[in-house]
Image (cartoon, coloured by chain):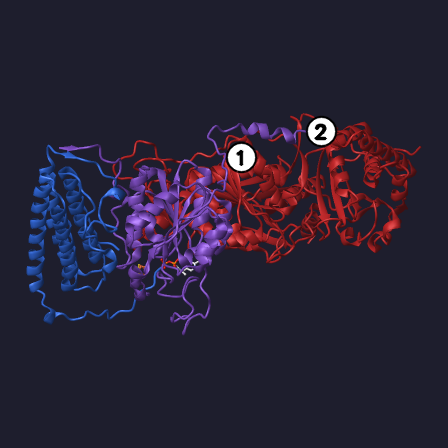
Amino acid sequence: MKTPGELRKSISFAIIGSGGAGALTAGAILLETAGKAGWYGIMNRSVGPQIRGGEAAALVRLTTHPVDCMAESYDFVIAIDWRNADRFAAEMPLAADGLAIGDTAGGEVPDVIAASGITVAQMAMKDLAGSVQGGRENMIAAGLAAKLAGLPVDTLMAVVEAKLASKGDEAINASRACISIGVSEADRFEQSFHLDKPVTGSTGRWLITGNEAIGLGAVRGGIRFAAAYPITPATEVLEWLAPALTRVGGALVQAEDELASINMAIGASFGGRASITATSGPGLALMVEALGLATASEIPIVVVDVMRGGPSTGIPTKSEQSDLNIAVYGCHGDAPHIVVAPLSVADCLFTAQWAVHLAEAMQAPAIVLSDQSLGQARALVDRPADIAFVAKRNVLGSEVEEAYDRYALTGSGVSPMALPGTAGGQYTADGLTHTVKGVPSSKESDHQNQLDKRRDKIENFDYGNHWADIEISNDDCTDTQFTILTWGSLAGPAREAMHTLAAEGISVKLLAIRLISPFLKQNFLDALQGSQRILIVEQTHSGQFHEYLRAKCDIPGEVRHFHRAGPKLIGPAEICARIRDWKTS
Amino acid sequence: MTAGVTSKVIGSAGELLAHAYQMELEAQERYGYLADQMEMHNNADLAKLFRELARVEGIHAGDILEQMQGMQVPQINPLDYKWSGSESPEALDMGDMHYMMTPRQALLLALKAEQNAFEFFDHLLKSTDDEDTRRFAAEFAEEEQEHVELVLKELKKHPESDERTREDMDPPIQQE
Amino acid sequence: MNIQQSPNFKASDYKSGLTPVWCPGCGDFHVLLSVTKALAELGTPPENVAVISGIGCSSRIPAYTNCYGFHGVHGRSLALGAGLKVARPDLTVMVMSGDGDGFSIGGNHFLHACRRNVDMTYIVMDNRVYGMTKGQPSPTTEPDWDSALSPGGTGLSPFHPLVIALASGANFVAREFSGDIKGSTRTIVEAVRHPGFSFVEILSPCVTFRPDERQWKTQTHAASVEATDDPARAARRIMTDDGFNVGVLYRGRRKPYETHVSDLAGDPAILEEEFAV
Ligand SMILES: Cc1ncc(C[n+]2csc(CCOP(=O)(O)OP(=O)(O)O)c2C)c(N)n1
Ligand code: SF4
């Protein structure tokens, strides 16, 4: 009998396999098991280019506390087979006390792993599964992983049973047998990576992906129409919305392309229904002209961009933050609109809901910049709080005065919008520069007035404190020397870096920006008060975020910049290393 | 395909009045649109001319409306008027317009429209036995004939010898 | 006076006070007239009608009506219209554009609008030229039509919108000549009433860049045969006619796109169950 090791706050493991071996399914089942047992976690995936039968890795991290990012080092990897595993090897560096277990019947152990000096064990998954009628290797891997991580095997069995309920007893029994084999095989190894007890006080746990959370946030915010054109990694937003919208009285239409999908959303919103579409970089590029139309004609819409590697078709299945520029600057002309970015998987819900509220309140397009690392990550999170933000459009009432001016110049810049069907409110929405009535005009004063109006309504809006997450690792410490300044999905790694450094006695402030555009300069500068050293972190090749900030204001203090293109995600350890370096330099 | 000179069967004085009224209204409206178009294209002479013609048709429409008092006048849906052509005979075909049109060219079109209107009533006069209908048809035909004379008189002020083809010295402007 | 109850709306009730910027003589004036007459005939209150367009001379039409209008971007009017109609099935949606807008930059949307069969009416004012940008050839322009951008002509066969509409699944196909106001009006009325996607190509002369099109007035003639509900027969007829055959050519029986939007909003809370662990 082995001695249990030290209990851990976070463990990470990968399950890999090819040819339909079910690695991703095993990962998902384990994540759910952890959730049922009260832990938190997050799972992402790495896949080959094949549609079916490709090599796939389920990357799982389980924790005792809420978690917003993947780990950078893995405790163990289980290979159902090692075929083409070198593709992922670099993405899952194993910890020094790590363990690699796999079946060499299907491929060699990748060089990086073999040469790393960690324990590499052979396990004949295929043969073991073959010993069970209808047995599956991935269930052996699941049993093995559960035991190594200290997950309750009963719970695992229950999750698998529920999943296979429709397949009948035979399948369930085969899976149970395989899980048991995996569990007993785990005893062969000295190491264990047991999780500590989860923190308590949670209001119940949700298992949700960023893409689903965007969909739910959108519907909560009032979205009742969606137009769709599939694209990786945004498709799941649309696929989730399709049945969901029907259940709440809305509709989704599949368009012929993104030119159509955004225009459909604009048309539906013109009709009074809060509307959304979701896409990724290539689709956003096609939507840019219509974003300008929505801006000029003041029709609210929400456009979700789940970013992937670019330019062009880029790396569809990998994350990057490189659509920042097109989202902010893509439109021709002066076209003020809203750009927001969710800061975690759970925050996808909040930010999408907020985006609906902002777009509707200001009658302007709002772009939500999510990315693959959030969108396709499945996370165990606390049940998100109910948020009050809902679509509240300033709509012209049925009592129409004599002369209705759709684009009247009001103090706020927002003018009541007549919805078709309202007698006396008829107007023509127009992308041409127009008068207050919407009549095309090339007069200087009309152009100026309408440009001012559209700018003012966005710049003068009260965004409250949602524009950014500002956190300090030590509440009692005010002279925070270091600030990590980031946006979107990198908030998670940055927060984790902040906590790690705090444990080492380095106090760090986190400034993670959710509202990218408009840029709230004064709030930004206030948040940086007292910061002497600012590390800007972003997942782009050219440093788009850094340049954006520089263009907007003089950043106080000393600034360093850590940026890198995808597909390798920037993680907490890399951020920590940079702060430590800086401290000692 | 637009102007029609022959009326299909019109059975009563009321129906005739409805047609006559509609004809004048449409003529008035049409001249008004043409005046707008010419104003938009800075052809002031023609704008003025069309505006005047619209005024005259308007007066005529008002007269007919008065005559309709106390009479049984049917309601007719736009597509059910018994014009033999696509539109009422007195409405100018907008397709014949040109922004550089001269008053003489416009008057020639107006002349044709007034003649069409005259023929509409004249044809009716000759083809119906109903006393009331004949009375109104005769009266309206006479009035249209007066309009014809008026236009002819106006035409004399713009003799062919004075006609100079107008030429646009500027190229067309591309928009949007 | 004893005029019996007049119709609810007159054509002029559907006109706005704006004077069109179109060249006098342009066929689009006629189309505007026919559309307003058709709406009066239909009796739909102006506020329940939406006229949606793209960019071009023809696409200027929404603001000249007294309906709700949307003058969108070049080529995307069908998408705007479809979104609106799906979101607001209670409205009468008319999408109106030109041959450049509808068949060139918006060509893909045309195919898919026919196929999707959303209950709306699509009127293309076909003048076989890009008017707004000063006379370039469009997909329906004859191969030998000379212009600055295509000296000597494009040498390309024109695109056949009616056949394409039919092949793509449009539920109602008609051709009209703008100057035939009565005919156009009748057809538009029928197109609006016909369920599903109705396509009406209206030959509408561009007197400025295609003065030759003034001849259409004498060239167009009523279709010599009745409309059919058999796409194969309709296709053969359309393919073999002289291009100036006007009237309703095809009345289909396909089921329109189904929309289920309702204002009885379900509570989004029901969507949360699936996420609870
Ligand atoms: C994206 C884009 N490309 C090009 C243009 C320029 N443009 C404006 S109208 C037009 C063609 C219009 O032709 P058509 O649809 O036939 O309309 P018409 O003017 O003849 O009525 C073009 C190319 C534009 N406005 N937008
Ligand atoms: S350019 Fe041609 S299409 Fe445009 S308004 Fe003039 S005549 Fe009509």
Give whichever of discs 2 and 1 has the lower sequence position: 2
Q: Is residue A456 rendered to the left or right of residue A581? A: left
- Quick one: quadrant of the N terminus of chain C? top left
Q: Residue furthest bottom?
A: C152
Closer mark to the observer between disc 2 and disc 1: 1
Label ID, residue A219: 1
The image quadrant of residue B34 is bottom left
Give chain B's shade: blue
Is residue A238 visible in the rendered structure shown here? yes
List x then y, in percent, for residue B166. Answer: 19, 69
Q: Mark 1 lies on which chain?
A: A
| Rendered position, A479 above or below B111 | above
Q: Name the residue under label 2.
A: A199
Q: Which chain carries label 2?
A: A
The chain whose colour is purple is C
The image quadrant of residue A71 is top right
Q: Which amino acid type corresponds to the residue marked 1 in the rendered image? A: Val
